[in-house]
Amino acid sequence: MSAVALAAEQVPERHYTHHEGRGPTPHRSNPVVIHRELTTLDLRPHMRVAEYGTGSAYSTELIARLVGPEGQVTSLDIDAYLTRWANIILAERGLENTRCFTADGTAGFRERAPYDRMVAWCTPPLLPKVWTDQVVGGGLIVAPLPIADVPNMTVVAKVRVRDDEPVVEAVFTGGYIEATASPKGDLDLPGRWVDWENRVPGPSWISLTWRAQDDRLHTGARTALDRLLNAAHTEPYEGGDVDVDWPSWRTFAAALGNPQLTMAGLRPDLWAIGHSTTESAAVIQQDGVILADSPDSPSLFALRDWLTAWENADRPAPETYTPTLMPTGNGQSPAGWHLRLSH
């Protein structure tokens, strides 16, 4: 049995996720995925670990047990309610090597650096340079990273830091809630890169990679969303079930690097990916329904071409892509690296 599996046997998950004093927390991840990320992190006794996204603190105790009493766990969350309770709940369990702080994890936490390992349960907009600066040489970071500037297009990356430079050793299917500057109550709306949202008559939203070309009134985003909500053309996707291979499709669409890439949520819990311009829009939803502004839509033709290429590539798994870290260099965004994939 692995070290993570052994630790999990000692940690009562429900004590954290449904604590009788604090109440249940929706800010929690699938324990199977938590165990996978912690296995990838290769935790050992005496290590100093930074964790971004305290949540229920279930993962915090797992890490604490894996690094042992001589190790140190620093856990950060933007939500003070969660971190205050996490400190109490961890103390109830007799843990002395954990400390939870209310802070924006995307800025790192220099006060307790350097760290041997970092793990994130929320998605930053890029791999922050402050993270790599605070990791020892040869250290590991395991974190979800965006692969396009739209919501929910992420992979989990295993990043090794050597000579202050990060190198992606592997990527895995997965992603977590976007890191935000304040606690997030609405878990249905993405926390970043939403270019327009409607709240009446029902919730809907859209995200455009071409947002820099839109005007200050978001006319392009508003128009594209309206075209999709009132689609003049619908058709079923004939290529088979899309939802079961949604991670493959969204990764493929992101890896295309097309400047017209678009993501939308037209109904609750039903995401859509496609193509849009100032003149047309078309997406395929997770249920396999294709929506477009017209049967002759240029965006519809582009989307069909993307889907054909995806099928011809045999619906590749996210793990099969080649990752590249691209440093930011315009001085207008936080220092760090954007993750992009190629096949």
Image (cartoon, rainbow, N blue to C red):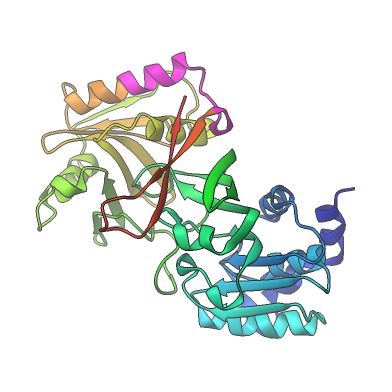
Magenta residues, start to end: 305-320
Q: Position of residue 241 (x, y in %)?
A: 50, 26
Looking at this view, name the residue that lies furthest to the top: 312
336 left or right of 262 in image: right
- Image position of 256 with respect to 188: above or below: above
- Report x, y in % for residue 180: 41, 66
Q: Please say if 136 is above or below 223.
A: below
Left or right of 234 on screen, residue 6? right
Residue at 56% across / 51% down in the picture? 163
> What is the quadrant of residue 63 in the picture?
bottom right
Is 234 in front, or is 119? 119
Q: Is residue 122 visible?
A: yes
Determine the main secondary structure of the stretch shown in magenta. helix
Res 43 quadrant in image: bottom right
Q: Residue furthest front?
A: 163
Residue 2 x %, y %: 86, 49
Q: Position of residue 212 (x, y in %)?
A: 18, 48
Is-magenta flag for residue 312? yes
Does the segment drawn in magenta span residue 189?
no
Q: Is residue 77 above or below residue 242?
A: below
143 to the left or right of 17: left
